[in-house]
Amino acid sequence: MKIIYPPLVEEGYRYCLSKGVATTKEEVFLNLVKQNILQENGQPTKQALDKGFVREFTEDENLTYGEFIALYPAFSEYDPSYFLLIDGFWEMHRTLQKEIIKQMKEKKLTEKEIMEISAYFENRINL
């Protein structure tokens, strides 16, 4: 059985590995619960949201391109022609998707960029 951890756990796990810290996703999860950043159900605590440890990404329908970029600033460096408003939501061209996924795998993005991009892709594709 495969356990699916919340994005914050995945981010914390990747961060630990990038710093040479040997850990498991379970240890990261338990540590975040102990620090009152995550609830046991994986949702962020009010404290984590209030202190900015966790950011909520709520993508409303029919955002302007500027509002979309304000929500996902990591995409501001890409040509706007790669994005199209489809059924009320900004979607990106497959060519750009592939390039961004490649950049993520090659660790060419910052943790903040990875967080934003992962939030964007969360209900769109499996990374």
Image (cartoon, helix red, strand yellow):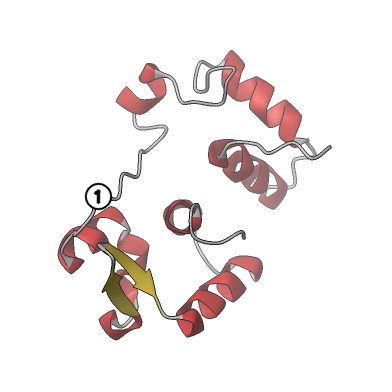
Q: Residue at x 49, y 26 (%)?
A: 43
Image spot of residue 78 (x, y percent): 34, 78
Above or below, 104 against 55 in this view is below
In which quarter of the view is residue 90 placed? Answer: bottom left
Horizontal placement of 121 versus 50: left or right?
right
Horizontal placement of 88 versus 110: left or right?
left
Image spot of residue 75 (x, y percent): 35, 68
- Image quadrant containing the C terminus: bottom right
Residue positioned most to the right: 1
In which quarter of the view is residue 86 placed? Answer: bottom left
Horizontal placement of 67 versus 38: left or right?
left
- Check disc 1 and give the amino acid type: Asp
Residue at mark 1: 60
Is residue 114 visible in the rendered image? The answer is no
Q: Residue at x 49, y 60 (%)?
A: 124
Mark 1: give few (<14), some (14-19) or many (20+) Cα within 10 Å. few
Above or below, 101 against 23 in this view is below
- Image quadrant containing the N terminus: top right
Q: Residue at x 34, y 32 (%)?
A: 52
In which quarter of the view is residue 29 placed? Answer: top right
Q: Residue at x 15, y 64 (%)?
A: 64
Image spot of residue 88 (x, y percent): 25, 62
Horizontal placement of 25 versus 67: left or right?
right
Is residue 84 visible in the rendered image? The answer is yes
Above or below, 20 against 76 in this view is above
Image spot of residue 16 (x, y percent): 67, 42
